[in-house]
Image: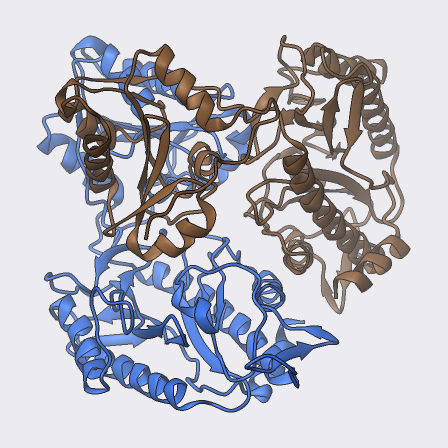
Chain colours: A blue, B brown
Amino acid sequence: MSRDRSSPEPNRDGSSAFERLSDATAAAGADAFVHVGDRFDDDLRYLSRFAGPDRDYAFVYADGRATLCAPRLFADQAEREFPGEVVPTRESSASSAAERALEELENRLTSPLEDARVLALPSMPAGATRTIADAVDEVTLEPIDLGRARKTSAERDRHAFVQRAAQRGMARAEAVLAAATVETAENDRRDALRWRGDPLTTERLRREVNATLARAGVRDAANTVIGAGATCADLHFTGEDRIDSGETVLLDLSPRGPRGYYADLTRTYVVGDVGEWERRAYEAVREAQDAAFDALRSGSGTRAADVHEAATGRLAEYGFETGDVDVGMYHGTGHGVGISLHEAPSLSSEEPLEAGHVVTVEPGVYDPDRGGVRLEDLVVVTADGYENLTAYPRTIEPDPERGEMVSDQSE
Amino acid sequence: MSRDRSSPEPNRDGSSAFERLSDATAAAGADAFVHVGDRFDDDLRYLSRFAGPDRDYAFVYADGRATLCAPRLFADQAEREFPGEVVPTRESSASSAAERALEELENRLTSPLEDARVLALPSMPAGATRTIADAVDEVTLEPIDLGRARKTSAERDRHAFVQRAAQRGMARAEAVLAAATVETAENDRRDALRWRGDPLTTERLRREVNATLARAGVRDAANTVIGAGATCADLHFTGEDRIDSGETVLLDLSPRGPRGYYADLTRTYVVGDVGEWERRAYEAVREAQDAAFDALRSGSGTRAADVHEAATGRLAEYGFETGDVDVGMYHGTGHGVGISLHEAPSLSSEEPLEAGHVVTVEPGVYDPDRGGVRLEDLVVVTADGYENLTAYPRTIEPDPERGEMVSDQSE
């Protein structure tokens, strides 16, 4: 069942994640690196390229070779996905995955297991760590820079694929919003939207968007956030709200592609008459995003926080407060995206940006009594600027033609 | 931002998961229970009902009160979902979540932090565990039975909802398969299927199924497995295969509902002429599933492995081997399903089934040279039998009318 493979996908600098493991293991004075986790562990996904089961499995790196101890029923999948050696194991709990890792270590090391020094990530489950620590001389827990932040061109292409799928989902939302009709209210402050004969809710809109994402070959990953009016200020709203004419409708789409890489795209719309606050908030946020893009034009070497400060500075000119506030912008301007939806670098960091960083640019302003506006694109930092992986217009009014065009493609 | 709430959703026996924590903490001679994890940690989801961010957050239970230390930007969501007290924290890494848990512990306990004894789950990250262990007297790692296996009627209803959505996805697959046309091959052994002008692949079929799941309000959760011919024997195949006339097409749909509970439904079809092996395999598996259902008719108290043995016994009568084999049935007959796709109990267990257990019943036979057949329903064990949450016919030929009927509903 096991066979030799070529080394894994190289990192941007030409090294591989395995070489980084090798270096980190040597630097820690350790004999081996061990990790135990499940399909939701993104470091393990990055190291193994194995999408894995929802139960724990083990990864062992020693003596220049990587081994994946994959549950027997997933062995075929592991052989397809993992670039190292696959050892099929019986279906396993966390502790038995650790025991299997110990067997593999014992086979691999020339000195006795009880003398072994093992390097591991702090994210390894405590139970598995204890099982290993009880059998070896020492387990050192240490974060390791696997090189995830700087994307290769292959990784860039995976982000671009899933970002295009997100754009199709957004266009579907525009089509639905543009086709909605306004139901005149009798006692309410605002008029409710109707679509295809029933009230249009955030949940109905989310289902349409998610169906379009699925047809484009990506997974909604439970990440499709849609707020309407006040719930736009609740950054992770996934409830069922009536959508009214005149209020902001904020859509934040972060689907995951089949190879594990995420998109991130946010737009905000208003159906019907656009009020003064909404128009001004939209303009401020669009200007803030442009200011952030301007700051990114110097590319690699730019202090990350300069991008955030460019955005917040522009918002301040419009009178919007930022930082730890209840009204205004109370989040950062962006974060890294990769095999995790949130990863390094943060645009609030003092560190310089590097070529290959994939980051969101997403200023927003919120007033819990009125609504919220956020605009988000996904970009790659380059040596002398940036490439925007997003090609999607920013308009506060939903465009029925954009929607129809993309809807035709996706059906 | 914090407020008092009623106690969480009760377990089936009328106790709550918090009472079980209280008992386990007392039994371990501990002063408090602490857990750190992210949205993918199903014990944390069950305890908190908080769908959470993809970064670590902390849960503290001490002195009869539960606190969720949720990242500030998720505080609104935590307030909506968590039945205890919410303490907003700054955006956190695993170690800072542990530090926040320590602050909360210090506020809560009457004795000094350094004398505290803490109970924790083995799944807590090793780094967070170390941070806590360094500050307190002792951390005891121990699995705790939170009562997840025995579902309440509210949990049963969530499973039933998502299982109905899975059925709509399956009907969509039938509609597509029934509408496919056969392209006569020139050199190939089999004839390829075409649909809407292009070759029908497992990926195109998966996109149609996933779009239907999305429209039904559930998430594919990256769990839609479709194999064709030989890849049916590769239990977790998610690649892009051409689908040919005469070969088995196996669809295993395990979407997750909005409240976190999973469905699990498998059917197998053949388009065109059904060969001798395929027809016999289908009949054997259907009979094996019926034998498993018969074994479940005694309900609560039935030895779980009796269900598995009823299925494998019937397969043996058809000449199919079971166990650690390459051809035949090489997996168990079923597993528990809940807030995790795979959880207790296993139908290979010697333990008795209990009322409220939600389990799959999924015999299958495979021949890597020919294909595979599996049929899977989701059932709830009751005091005197079982309730099948699945109402979906078992036919080897895809039914165009079933497909069209459900397709109309979902569009």
Q: Quadrant of the C terminus of chain A?
A: bottom right
Residue B218 at x, y percent in the picture? 62, 52
- Confirm whether residue B228 shows in the render: no
Residue B28 at x, y percent in the picture? 34, 12
Residue found at x 55% / y 43%? B260
Q: In front here: B151 or B110?
A: B110
Q: In front here: B124 or A381?
A: B124
The quarter holding residue A70 reads top left
Residue found at x 27% / y 71%? A329
Residue found at x 66% / y 18%? B347
Residue A232 at x, y percent in the picture? 43, 69
Residue found at x 63% / y 8%? B350
| Image position of A144 with respect to A151: above or below | above
Q: In front here: B72 or B282?
A: B72
Q: In front here: A85 or B138?
A: B138
| Image position of B166 with respect to A303: above or below | above
In the picture, measured across the screen, residue B248 lies left or right of residue B256, that is right
- Confirm whether residue A378 shows in the render: yes
- How many numbered discs, if any? 0
The quarter holding residue A387 reads bottom left
Residue B92 at x, y percent in the picture? 24, 47
In the picture, measured across the screen, residue B390 lies left or right of residue B287, that is left
| Image position of A40 with respect to A377: above or below | above
In the picture, measured across the screen, residue A60 lies left or right of residue A279, that is left
| Image position of A386 with respect to A121: above or below | below
